[in-house]
């Protein structure tokens, strides 16, 4: 997705996926062996480095995966993963952002709640976890879910207790897709701020959201800056030209500086609500009295003028490829820009190099949505009231069991269980503890007593909102 969004199958007969480089199942490790040795005994697992962290062992690893899980003999690649090891007698959380994996020790909210281990997975085709040569047709949600399935199968022999999967934004989508294709792997799913664009051509929900989010005063300020930026296109593009030259930025993928400029401006309101809070509206300049530099600075701080350059887009090529082939992407009308916008919301195709072929498959998200509504078991979706991505949410139907949708009041794209109102916070925490198999007796009798099993760690529990590319602003 861009700096503000970005993101963001038909029933498949699932067959055993055994990599050409080695079987997915780990040999049963010898009791008492050091955890590093046990992990590295898994065929296809390699160590990049171990980093110390009090109370844990933290490993950065690679795991050999087939490029195509349907034809595992046709090439492989090394997928980067990390392991935050607590104890093999604790439950384990599989986390992904849906993008690159961080190699700094971090603990997702479910991991902190259950006091567990965490396996973090880099999404296929995000460098360095990219096959060479890259066959882009093998970048789809089933292949990615199969990556996770093989990692789980390999590590389950070491971490035999309950497993949960989680992620935020595209990571929340990824956790959901994994559950759809491999519903017997995980004991629970916690998906944060996960968009659900069921019908890509029907995006009126986003228009209704942006017309009502926050307060009219704040919406008017944001719309005013956005409109003024297009009115002052000439002087602001002069600033952009200098900025691009100073940083050696180019615009071959999007096509021109003018198209990149408008894409950044159109991202502005969406990006604000995605990453900011209503109180932050005080920092938005008054458009009619603002200088060119003030308009530029506000848009750059919120949307980011570097993003639609070739250099800004390149790391997110896999995201835009998926947005344009399976995930879908928002298309916002923004009537206050009528007569000023030359391109409107540009499609994902504009943000992927032309030598990569793309074809949209409209049935993929519909399949996932239908499956969740009728088959969800032990699934939790957490959204933010003021997050644009929540305009189209996953919903639960009559077939869902022990599954929930929660909304954090006033929350943005960083919404989580801790931000829910107290009774929902306790209920959600209790569900996570139960699914992980570690709910204390008191919690099993009274959900109101549920709380995380660990103390807050300022470094390990740092909540970095994933600033994905903005599908479109």
Image (cartoon, rainbow, N blue to C red):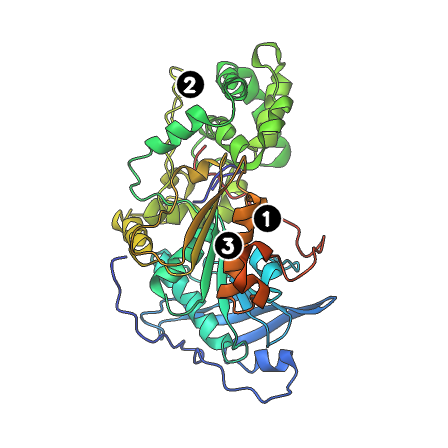
Q: Left of 443 or right of it: where is 20? A: left
Residue 418 has which mark?
A: 1
Give the residue displayed 58% in from the left and 33% down from the top.
276
Residue 137 position (above or below residue 311): below
Query: At 49% from the left edge and 14% from the top edge, which residue is drawn?
Result: 231
Q: Residue at x 45, y 75 (%)?
A: 153
> In this view of the protein, which residue sits in the foreground, 87 or 428?
428
Depth check: 272 or 265 in front?
A: 272
Query: In the figure, residue 392 lies in which quadrant?
Result: top left
Residue at the extreme top: 289
Distance, label 2 to label 3, CA atoms, is 35 Å
Foreground tag (1 vs 2): 1
Figure check: 198 above or below 24: above
Residue 99 seen in the figure: no
Q: In the rendered structure, are the residues bearing label 1 and label 2 in contact, judged by CB atoms less than 8 Å apart?
A: no
Residue placed under numbered mark 2 in the picture: 337
Extreme residue in the bottom direction: 30
Rounded to the nearest whole Å, what is the CA distance between mark 1 and mark 3? 15 Å
Marked residue nearer the N-terminal end (2 or 3): 3
Image quadrant in which the C terminus is located: top left
Instruction: Name the residue carrying label 3.
Output: 167
Q: Residues within 10 Å of mark 2 (few under 14, many from 20)?
A: some
In the displayed structure image, the side of residue 40 where residue 378 appears, left or right: left
- Identify the residue shown where x is 40% and y is 63%: 145
On screen, 200 above or below 259? below
Where is residue 235 shown, x and y percent of the image? 56, 16
Q: Position of residue 372 (x, y in %)?
A: 33, 54
Label 1's element?
Answer: helix
Point out the frontmost of discs 2 and 3: 3
Dot 3 crowding, Cα within 10 Å, few <14, some 14–19, many 20+: many
């Amino acid at each position: 997705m861009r700096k503000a969004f970005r993101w963001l199958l038909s029933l498949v007969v699932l067959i055993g996926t055994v990599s050409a480089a080695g079987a997915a199942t780990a040999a049963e490790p010898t009791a008492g062996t050091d955890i590093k040795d046990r992990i590295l005994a898994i065929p296809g697992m390699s160590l990049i480095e171990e980093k110390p962290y009090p109370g844990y062992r933290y490993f950065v690893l690679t795991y050999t995966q087939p490029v195509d899980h349907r034809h595992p003999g046709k090439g492989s690649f090394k997928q980067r993963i990390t392991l935050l090891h607590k104890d093999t007698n604790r439950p384990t959380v599989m986390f992904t952002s849906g993008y690159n994996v961080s190699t700094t020790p971090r603990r997702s909210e479910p991991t902190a709640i259950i006091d567990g281990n965490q396996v973090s997975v880099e999404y296929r085709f995000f460098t360095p976890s990219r096959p060479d040569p890259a066959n882009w047709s093998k970048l789809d949600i089933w292949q990615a879910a199969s990556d996770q399935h093989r990692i789980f199968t390999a590590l389950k022999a070491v971490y035999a207790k309950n497993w949960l999967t989680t992620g935020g934004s595209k990571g929340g989508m990824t956790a959901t897709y994994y559950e759809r294709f491999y519903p017997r792997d995980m004991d629970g799913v916690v998906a944060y701020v996960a968009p659900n664009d069921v019908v890509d051509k029907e995006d009126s929900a986003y228009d209704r959201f942006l017309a009502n989010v926050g307060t009219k005063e704040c919406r008017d300020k944001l719309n005013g800056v956005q409109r003024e930026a297009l009115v002052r296109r000439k002087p602001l593009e002069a600033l952009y030209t200098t900025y691009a030259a100073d940083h050696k930025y180019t615009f071959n993928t999007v096509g021109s500086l003018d198209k990149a400029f408008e894409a950044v401006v159109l991202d502005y309101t969406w990006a604000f609500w995605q990453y900011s809070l209503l109180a932050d509206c005080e920092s938005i300049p008054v458009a009619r009295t603002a200088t060119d530099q003030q308009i530029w600075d506000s848009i750059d701080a919120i949307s980011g003028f570097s993003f639609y350059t070739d250099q800004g887009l390149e790391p997110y090529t896999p995201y835009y490829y998926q947005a344009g082939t399976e995930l879908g992407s928002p298309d916002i009308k923004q009537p206050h820009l009528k007569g000023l916008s030359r391109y409107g919301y540009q499609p994902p195709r504009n943000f992927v190099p032309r030598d990569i072929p793309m074809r949209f498959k409209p049935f993929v998200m519909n399949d996932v949505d239908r499956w969740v509504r009728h088959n969800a078991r032990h699934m939790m979706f957490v959204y933010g009231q003021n997050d644009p991505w929540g305009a189209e949410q996953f919903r639960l139907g009559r077939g869902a069991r022990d599954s929930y949708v929660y909304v954090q009041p006033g929350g943005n794209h960083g919404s989580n269980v801790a931000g829910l109102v107290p009774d929902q916070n306790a209920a959600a925490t209790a569900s996570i503890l139960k699914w992980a198999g570690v709910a204390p007796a008191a919690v099993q009798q009274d959900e109101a007593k549920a709380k995380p099993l660990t103390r807050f760690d300022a470094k390990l529990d740092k909540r970095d909102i994933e600033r994905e590319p903005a599908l479109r602003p």
